[in-house]
């Protein structure tokens, strides 16, 4: 299932907004299917690490890390947010 993230706004920065987006995605996704969740950031102007972390953590906890992916993006804020989240995850392990 491809999720067009821009439906949640063009500027995505807060953790509460990320939690709301994750809950919205979960409401439309069947947990028992093996379908992947692909986040498409086309049309999004900016994403903060807090928003990204909340969405990815919530969805990956529910559906598994291998089923939740971000589609390739050239958006610098998406790329930097993913780097920050990966660094934080590496520090926890």
Image (spheres, rainbow, N blue to C red):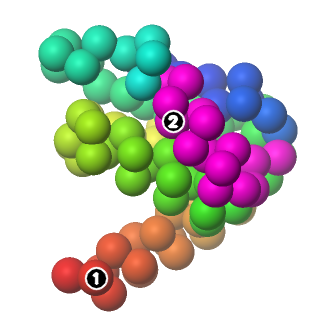
Q: Nearer the viewer, residue 22 or 71?
A: 22
Q: Is residue 64 left or right of residue 75?
A: left
Q: Residue at x 50, y 46 (%)?
A: 55
Q: Say which mark, if any, is on residue 92.
A: 1
Q: Residue at x 75, y 48 (%)?
A: 12
Quarter that holds the N terminus? top left
Q: In which quarter of the view is residue 28 placed?
A: top left
Q: Is residue 91 above or below residue 41?
A: below
Disc 2: CA contacts within 10 A as few (<14), some (14-19) or many (>=20): some
Image spot of residue 23 (x, y percent): 50, 30
Image spot of residue 41 (x, y percent): 64, 38
Element carrying mark 1: helix
The residue indicated by pointer 2 is: 22
| Res. 58 visible in picture | yes
Q: Is residue 27 above or below residue 43?
A: above
Image spot of residue 62 (x, y percent): 27, 38
Q: Earlier in the sequence, mark 2 or mark 1?
A: 2
Q: Which residues are magenta?
A: 11-25
Element carrying mark 2: helix
Image spot of residue 63 (x, y percent): 24, 34
């Amino acid at each position: 299932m491809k999720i067009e993230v821009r439906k949640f706004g063009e500027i995505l920065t807060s953790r509460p907004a990320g939690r709301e987006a994750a809950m919205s995605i979960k409401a439309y996704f069947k947990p028992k299917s093996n379908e992947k969740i692909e986040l498409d950031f086309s049309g999004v102007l900016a994403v903060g690490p807090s928003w990204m972390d909340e969405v990815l953590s919530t969805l990956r906890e529910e559906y598994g890390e291998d089923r939740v992916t971000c589609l390739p993006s050239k958006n610098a804020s998406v790329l930097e947010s993913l780097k920050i989240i990966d660094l934080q995850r590496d520090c926890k392990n």
